[in-house]
Image (tube, rainbow, N blue to C red):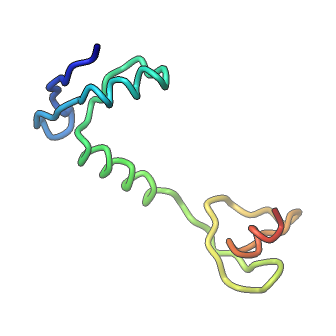
């Protein structure tokens, strides 16, 4: 039913193949649009957005270790490092 398509990346301009398997996956997930970026540019965009996230230094309320969190801590709630957070779940 699906056939491989050649698309052009909107970031780097290189051609890439949108495989039949990828098209089937997109259809199963209900995605309406074809990918606009090649795999390398998609990966780079995801990495850049993760780096752009502001991180805040905190002291874990349980073990006292220093940690970084992606939200601004408030004084009315405890903040935990990754390990202690998992223990509280």
Nearest the eye: 63 or 68: 63
Q: Report the residue that reaches farthest toward the top.
A: 1
Residue 56 horizontal side relative to residue 15, left or right? right
Q: Report the residue that reaches farthest toward the front.
A: 1
Which quadrant of the view contains residue 54?
Answer: bottom right
Residue 66 horizontal side relative to residue 29, left or right? right
The residue lying at 51 percent from left, 57 percent from top is 53
Nearest the eye: 86 or 14: 86
Q: Position of residue 58 (x, y in %)?
A: 69, 75
Residue 68 horizontal side relative to residue 39, left or right? right
Q: Position of residue 51 (x, y in %)?
A: 43, 60
Q: Position of residue 62 (x, y in %)?
A: 83, 80
Nearest the eye: 3 or 7: 3
Q: Is residue 59 above or below residue 28?
A: below
The residue lying at 34 percent from left, 47 percent from top is 45
Q: Is residue 59 above or below residue 27?
A: below
Location of the C terminus by quadrant is bottom right
Which quadrant of the view contains residue 27?
Answer: top left
Q: Position of residue 5 (x, y in %)?
A: 18, 23
Q: Report the residue that reaches farthest toward the left.
A: 14
The residue lying at 45 percent from left, 56 percent from top is 50
Location of the N terminus by quadrant is top left
Nearest the eye: 67 or 37: 37
Q: Is residue 74 above or below residue 17?
A: below
The residue lying at 41 percent from left, 17 percent from top is 32
Residue 25 horizontal side relative to residue 8, left or right? right
């Amino acid at each position: 039913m699906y056939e491989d398509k050649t698309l052009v990346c909107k970031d780097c301009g290189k051609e890439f193949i949108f495989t039949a398997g990828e098209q089937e996956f997109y259809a199963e997930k209900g995605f309406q649009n074809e990918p606009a970026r090649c795999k390398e540019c998609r990966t780079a965009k995801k990495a850049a957005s993760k780096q752009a996230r502001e991180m805040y230094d905190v002291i874990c309320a349980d073990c006292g270790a220093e940690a970084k969190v992606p939200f601004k801590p408030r004084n009315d709630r405890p903040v935990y490092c990754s390990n202690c957070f998992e223990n509280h779940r």
